[in-house]
Amino acid sequence: MTESIKTDVLVIGSGIGGLYFAIHMADHASVTIITKKESFTSNTNWAQGGIAATIDTNDSPELHIADTLGAGAGLCNREMVSLMVREGPRHIQRLIELGVNFTTSDHEHLHLGKEGGHSRSRIVHAQDLTGRAVETALIDRVNNHPNITLLEHHFAIELLTEHHLGIKTNDISCYGAYVLDTKQRKPKKILSKITMVASGGLGHVYPYTTNPDIATGDGVAMGYRAGAEVANMEFIQFHPTSLYHPKANSYLISEAVRGFGGILKLKNGQEFMHKYDKRQNLAPRDIVARAIDSEIKKSGEECVFLDVTHIDPEKTKEHFPNIYETCLSFGIDMTREMIPVVPAAHYSCGGIRTDSKGRTTLNRLYACGESSCTGVHGANRLASNSLLEALVFAWEASIDIREQLQQLENSVEFPDWDDTGTVNPEEWILVSHNKREAQQVMNDYVGIVRSDLRLARAKRRMDFLKDETEAYYKKTKITTQILELRNIIKVSNLIIEGAIKRRESRGLHYTTDYPGKDDKHFLIDTVLRSF
């Protein structure tokens, strides 16, 4: 028998969106959070830069909105952007109340950094480890709330819908999820009135990524399989500056370093960003990533360099202590020598499509954070808007759910997880090989620069990997590795399909076959649904 757990609200993921949402739901409902690794393992914990918010008297919501719309290349949902920006300051204050110690400039006022694409200094941060500071404070609140149960090492397999009852309908509802307890190696059913998908990003679709190992697109893959609409999957943000070192695991060199005065240079010390954008080193990420990609291809070198040696060394150490120490651990003193950098997959602007309340196109299913597509990022995310988006729409979802929770039932019975006829996996080489191959296909054909030929090749290869992996999945007992591989392949296919549909270049999607924007035909979201 499959163990069954009942809860009012199920939260899948323990990043900023899921935790902030859970904290604001817990006074009104029983909340169960599941996370596939430890609670601290999330994209949030790796976020260095900060949270964009219009706090300074020199700034205004209108300027922040304009910067966001500009970065989004015409595809942002203006109403959603306005909501996010105008609500931002109150959530910064709420984080302070929850115990986040942001960096101050004079022990009274918050220190505000500036990053690429921003016209004003508005990045609230905790030195260069903002995500960790936020995560630590939120986890502490979660662990001390009697209405919240946090289950580590629990991997969501599939969302529970009418499909599992043999009912065919287009009016689909979500009733929880099948979950794998990876410590006990047994499946469970978690039945809930409301399910919130906040499982983070998908960076490990690519071989080089700034994301932690858990970022395999699980939430988007599950949502799509359940019938939810996903949107704008072709817009993958490559962070321009990850540390280029064989042991650095694509460690992120924050965009704030360029905002601080860092200059991108070639190996010979020559600057190059002036050739690509008038904002030079403060241009939006998509422009900087393409510029670096272009210079690497032209020069034949393996990387470019970020130079801060002209800045007072003590100020550099003060503003970026963690980056300084990390670089030093790899033998690079950033105050004396240039930092070798390359672009790496960093953030997905697409995801499960939601409205302003976090509601997806499935009843009872919500999404927030990087798993969602609210429309605020459009074709390219403005730096430090991601944590802001997660906070605002997690809050909006909590308000919406509180108003309807008492009217919802949690009495539908679902069948046990059926693994009859499956065997324990023996051919691990198939799983590891298929993962490497899928990542390499995405890197080679669906990276920073694309073409019809590359995308067609990627689709053929990914379809083959999908068929092979699905056959293996159906005859084998589930494991974390198999589930992640299956999700990586599904999300890869969604990115490819979205890229094929968008016959133009806009924001993060650049194709040599359609190098210009086409507002007449493509000033719309790319929406995909499984049925």
Image: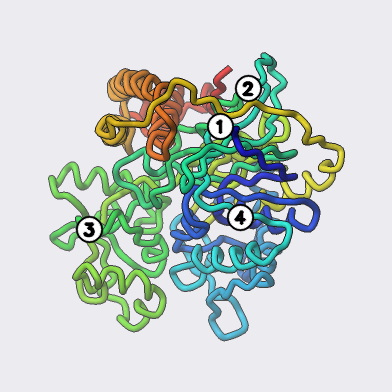
Residue 334: quadrant of the picture? bottom left
363 with respect to 198 (left or right): right
> SS of the residue at dot 1?
strand
Discs 3/2, front: 2
Within-10-Å neighbours for mark 4: few <14, some 14–19, many 20+? some
The label shown at residue 150 is 4
Point 37% across, 66% down: residue:
257
> What kind of residue is marked 4?
Leu
Mark pair 3, 2: CA separation: 44 Å
| Residue 28 visible in rendering | yes
Left or right: where 365 falls relative to 386: right
Cα separation, mark 4 vs mark 3, equals: 33 Å
Q: Position of residue 476 (x, y in %)?
A: 40, 27
Query: Which residue lies at the image location 47% right of the left edge and 52% below the top edge?
Result: 37
Q: Quadrant of the C terminus?
A: top right
User: Badge 3 is on which residue?
Assistant: 247
The Cα atoms of the two marked residues, 4 and 1, are separated by 19 Å
State if disc 2 and disc 1 touch (CB < 8 Å).
yes
Q: Are marks 4 and 1 in contact (CB under 8 Å)?
A: no
Q: Which residue is mark 2?
A: 164
User: Which of the marked residues, 4 or 3, is nearer the chain's N terminus?
Assistant: 4
SS class, disc 3:
loop
The answer to whether 208 is drawn above or below residue 58 in the figure is: above
Q: Which mark is residue 29?
A: none
SS assignment at label 2:
helix
- The answer to whether mark 3 and mark 1 are in CB contact below 8 A is no
Mark 3 or mark 1: which comes first in sequence?
A: 1
- Say which residue label 1 marks: 158
Viewer-side residue, 304 vs 205: 205
Taking the image as shown, residue 135 lies to the left or right of residue 404, namely left
Amino acid found under the numbered disc labelled 2: His
The residue lying toward the viewer, choosing from 375 and 64, is 375
